[in-house]
Image: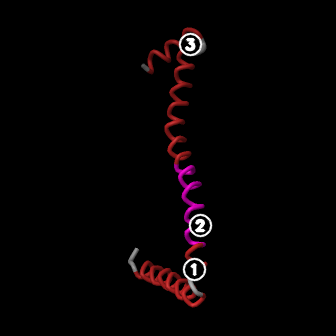
Amino acid sequence: MGQFFNQQFANTGHFPQEIIHRLCLNFVKALKRVINPVAELFFALSVLLPLLEQYTTIFLVRSTSKQRLENVMFFFNAGLNSEVQNSRQPG
C-alpha cells in the first residue's frame, strides 16, 4: 500500500483527493474514539461532584463540632499513616 502512495505521488506530484479525504475521515474517527470517553468522564464528574458536595455538607451540618473534629483528625491521621507506610516501602 505504501508503494501505491509513493507511485501516485511520483506520477502526479500530489496524493489523490479521495485518499486525503479518507485519511482525514479516519483521523477524525480515531479522535472521536479518544474524545468521547473523556467527555463522558467529565459529564459523570459534573453530575457526581455536586452530589458528593451536598452529601458532605449534610454530614458536616448534622454532626456536632466535637464529631467534626474527630472526623477531621481521623482522616488526617489516616493520611499521615499512609504517607509513612509509603515512605517505608523500598523503591
Which residue is identified by label 3? 16
**Mark 3 vs mark 1: which is more N-terminal?**
3
For disc 1, the neighbor class at 10 Å (few under 14, some 14 to 19, many from 20) is few
Q: Say the numbered circle drawn on residue 23.
A: none
Q: Say the numbered circle drawn on residue 53.
A: 2
The overriding secondary structure of the stretch rendered in magenta is helix
Span highlighted in magenta in the image: 41-57
- Image quadrant containing the N terminus: top left
Q: x%, y% of residue 71? A: 52, 84
Q: Say the numbered circle drawn on residue 62.
A: 1
Residue 61 in the figure: left or right of residue 8: right
User: From the viewer's perspective, is the residue at label 3 or at label 2 nearer?
Assistant: 2
Q: Residue at x 53, y 88 (%)?
A: 70
Q: Residue at x 51, y 41 (%)?
A: 34
Residues 66 and 4: in front is 66
**Mark 3 vs mark 2: which is more N-terminal?**
3
User: From the viewer's perspective, is the residue at label 1 or at label 2 nearer?
Assistant: 1
- Image quadrant containing the C terminus: bottom left
